[in-house]
Image (tube, rainbow, N blue to C red):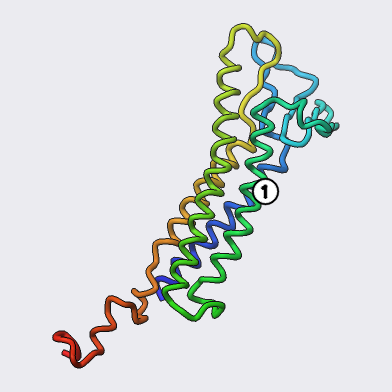
Amino acid sequence: MLAACLEFLGLALCMAGSLLVVIACALPMWKVTAFIGSNIVVAQTTWEGLWMTCVVQSTGQMQCTLHHSVLSLAQDLQTARALTVISAVLGLVGLSVTITGAQWTNCIKDEIVKTRVVNAGGIIYIISGLSVLVPVSWMANTIIVNFHNSHISSAKMEIGASIYIGWAATALLLLGARSCAAPSHGASGALTPSNTHLLNPSHPMGLR
């Protein structure tokens, strides 16, 4: 029962992490305009995302422009777009694999095979978490370096909400994957190769 609860908890964390990956990928808030200096009254704010760039006016109006050409994007944006999409897809694959081998499903009867399938699902979720960790960390490093670059005198960019969401998604995916892979099906009372000898009367330790 404990193993099943841990699996369910791990799967819930991974699903929440995958949802945050999709949100981070969709929101155009990877880079936001940072206004520095004495003039704090600004007419507009720029949001830059993986798929579009939005300009928010001080009146509340927002106008977004899609990135029609992938090659025209900066290298960090191209990499972030590819890896976040891969992470989201791996989240769906990990969900299918983990549910297939979960203790509270009957898709697979053999307990040993179930354990291996759940572990495989956990590995997929780990790869998914690392796939979103790389682009958000790279993007954050680029933003910080450019922010402190004295040669850039125009409006600089700050870390947007999508990057923080990506870090949160990574934490949930890695924690969930660890919870999924931690339980051992043998611990729930099922017979495993290590304890079947206890039912063998001819074994020195059998039926004692």
Q: Which residue is mark 1?
A: 22
The answer to whether residue 92 is visible is: yes
Identify residue type, mark 1.
Val
Q: Determine whether, in the image, residue 85 is placed left or right of residue 3.
A: right
What residue is rendered at 60% in x and 23% in y?
Answer: 143
Query: Would you place residue 175 above or below residue 156 in this image?
Result: below
From the viewer's side, name the closer residue of 203 and 160.
203
Name the element at disc 1: helix
In the rendered image, which quarter is residue 96 located in?
A: bottom right
Bin the neighbour count of mark 1 within 10 Å (Cα to Cα): few under 14, some 14-19, many 20 and up: some
Give the image location of residue 138, x and y in percent.
56, 30
Give the image location of residue 171, x and y in percent.
50, 47
What residue is rendered at 84% in x and 33% in y?
Answer: 68
Give the image location of residue 16, x and y in percent.
59, 55
What residue is rendered at 64% in x and 50% in y?
Answer: 88
The answer to whether residue 62 is visible is: no
From the viewer's side, name the closer residue of 83 and 15.
83
Give the image location of residue 202, x and y in percent.
18, 91
What residue is rendered at 57% in x and 59% in y?
Answer: 94
From the viewer's side, name the closer residue of 126 and 8.
126
Please, which residue is most extreme toward the left here?
204
